[in-house]
């Protein structure tokens, strides 16, 4: 089948590569000419396991092309995917500027029936706005052609996006006509394992499903972080509690890890946008507001522990920071808890020596040569001359370090762990002071 994808960001690129991988003829479009050139050379603008090899393989097979030529892409694809960013506006609502610009671009050269697919995360009602934008342009051009607008939200986890796309648990398709439903069914057929993964529904329900999924997951995390704060105060160990409650299949073990707060491009933005949608229809989303507030507070948790430990005396201290990305296996630092921590430490006059397996370039891009930040080549180098170690991302590399070596580098044998990856009993035996989330010291 012929597929065109607007936007070569995270979602667009993974979607394009995976559709090509199963034999479709895919064109990816972006307004950023440098990015398109880079992709044509086989260089990835983001790090995602397995992506580069898949892009190169399909590009070489002629099934995956990158261009800035939107008209050619509109001509090419029976499916026109919109996979551009929807950043948060000042008031938390999703900014639809890019989505509507793409809708207009498609309508500017559309001559015959196309299925326009919203893959970007967009608030309920966006399909209608896309339709309005398309109608306006078609009318202006005097072109009369039928077309459909379909909602097909993505559920890709960064770091596991290829696998999530190739082996989806579900594919949500919101559409109001039988023809598009059949076409989407055919397009996604190669990704069914054992049984049909496609769940079809009306457009508005599909749009809301995306937000509902992310808000539910964010709620689980904030719930656990709240419980960790209670555990701290009553002298319980949240890790035992986690294992205890997860055994109930109604609760389950997924997404109940307490930590330094959720980050990334989706949860913070989507919880805000859903709350905004609720306000817009005169509903006060109390639970969603609390989910966000708890997360905000949680991002200060580790800094507060550090400040308490040093009795407020942080000026001139130096901290080794392991992990900068918002989670392992990605170089993404959007809304990463590490950023909030570093900024608080700097404000208090402390400095940071940081190491991350993938996010060093991104950190350099964000903070440049900022005073108080030294980027190191290895976890060990980051420890040199520091007062204490702070772990912010649970990369596998950090899970079983040489604790003797850590101690030999640090002025104090103190570890602050924002992801609860170490065993308190082991660290106590080795003579460390260990501060984790919701665990007795
Ligand atoms: N997190 C926790 N505790 C947990 C699980 C996750 O603190 O038990 C944190 C994690 O550290 C990270 C954030 O939650 O900061 C988000 O993690 P994750 O969901 O793995 O990352 P994303 O790549 O942002 O993926 C989410 C959804 C995915 C959706 C995507 C974009 O999981 O289904 O497609 O956002 O909307």
Image: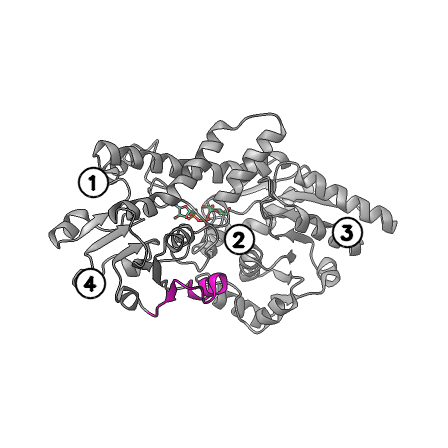
Report, in whole angstroms, how far the alpha carbon at label 2 lies from the one at label 3: 29 Å
Which labelled disc corresponds to residue 134? none
Please provide percent x and percent y for residue 273.
56, 39
Residue bearing mark 3? 107
Residue shown at 26%/38% (left/top)? Answer: 238
Q: Nearer the viewer, mark 1 or mark 3?
A: 1
Q: Nearer the viewer, residue 413 or 181?
A: 413
Q: Nearer the viewer, mark 1 or mark 2?
A: 1
Report, in whole angstroms, how far the alpha carbon at label 1 lies from the one at label 3: 60 Å
Residue shown at 76%/41% (left/top)? Answer: 132
Please provide percent x and percent y for residue 383.
27, 64
Does residue 137 appear left or right of residue 278 in this picture? right
Report, in whole angstroms, how far the alpha carbon at label 3 lies from the one at label 4: 59 Å
Is 365 in the magenta?
yes
Along the polypeptide, which appears first: circle 1 or circle 4? Answer: 4
Determine whether label 2 and label 3 are within 8 Å by CB. no
Along the polypeptide, which appears first: circle 4 or circle 2? Answer: 2
Residue shown at 32%/40% (left/top)? Answer: 253
Write down the region rendered in magenta. Answer: 359-377
Residue bearing mark 4? 402
Report, in whole angstroms, how far the alpha carbon at label 4 lies from the one at label 2: 45 Å
Residue bearing mark 1? 440
Is residue 347 placed above or below 33 in the rendered structure?
above
Residue bearing mark 2? 190
Secondary structure of the residue carrying tag 2 is helix
Does residue 211 appear left or right of residue 351 in this picture? right
Along the polypeptide, which appears first: circle 1 or circle 3? Answer: 3
């Amino acid at each position: 089948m012929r597929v065109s994808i607007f936007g070569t960001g995270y979602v667009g690129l993974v979607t394009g590569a995976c559709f090509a991988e199963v034999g479709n003829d895919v064109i990816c479009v972006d307004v950023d000419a440098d990015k398109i050139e880079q992709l044509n050379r086989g260089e990835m603008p983001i790090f995602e396991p397995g992506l580069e090899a898949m892009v190169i393989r399909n590009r070489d097979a002629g099934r995956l092309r990158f261009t800035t030529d939107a008209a050619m892409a509109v001509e090419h694809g029976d499916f026109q995917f919109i996979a551009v960013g929807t950043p948060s506006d000042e008031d938390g609502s999703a900014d639809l500027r890019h989505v509507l610009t793409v809708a207009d671009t498609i309508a500017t050269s559309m001559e015959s029936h196309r299925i326009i697919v919203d893959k970007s995360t967009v608030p309920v009602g966006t399909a209608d706005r896309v339709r309005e934008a398309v109608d306006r342009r078609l009318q202006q051009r005097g072109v009369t052609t039928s077309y459909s607008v379909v909602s097909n939200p993505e559920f890709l986890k960064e770091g596991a996006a290829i696998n999530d796309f190739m082996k989806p648990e579900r594919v949500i398709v919101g559409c109001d006509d039988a023809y598009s439903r059949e076409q989407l069914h055919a397009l996604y057929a190669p990704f069914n394992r054992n049984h049909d993964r496609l769940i079809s529904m009306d457009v508005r329900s599909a749009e809301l499903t995306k937000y509902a999924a992310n808000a539910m997951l964010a709620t689980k995390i904030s719930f656990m972080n709240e419980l960790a704060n209670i555990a701290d105060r009553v002298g319980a160990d949240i890790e035992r509690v986690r294992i205890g409650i997860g055994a109930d299949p109604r609760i389950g073990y997924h997404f109940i890890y307490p930590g330094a707060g959720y980050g990334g491009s989706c949860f913070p933005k989507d919880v805000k946008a859903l709350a905004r949608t609720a306000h817009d229809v005169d509903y006060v989303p109390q639970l969603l507001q609390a989910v966000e507030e708890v997360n905000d507070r949680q991002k200060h948790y580790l800094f507060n522990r550090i400040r308490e430990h040093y009795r407020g005396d942080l000026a001139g201290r130096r901290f080794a920071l392991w992990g900068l990305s918002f989670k392992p296996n990605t170089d993404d630092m959007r809304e990463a808890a590490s950023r909030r921590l570093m900024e608080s430490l700097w404000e208090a006059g402390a400095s940071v020596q940081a190491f991350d397996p993938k996010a060093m370039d991104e950190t350099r891009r964000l903070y440049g040569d900022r005073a108080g930040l030294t980027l190191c080549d290895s976890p060990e180098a980051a420890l040199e001359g520091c007062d204490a170690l702070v772990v912010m991302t649970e990369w596998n590399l950090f899970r079983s370090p040489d604790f003797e070596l850590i101690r030999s580098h640090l002025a104090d044998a103190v570890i602050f762990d924002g992801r609860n990856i170490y065993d308190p009993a082991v660290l106590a035996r080795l003579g460390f002071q260990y501060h984790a989330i919701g665990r007795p010291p």
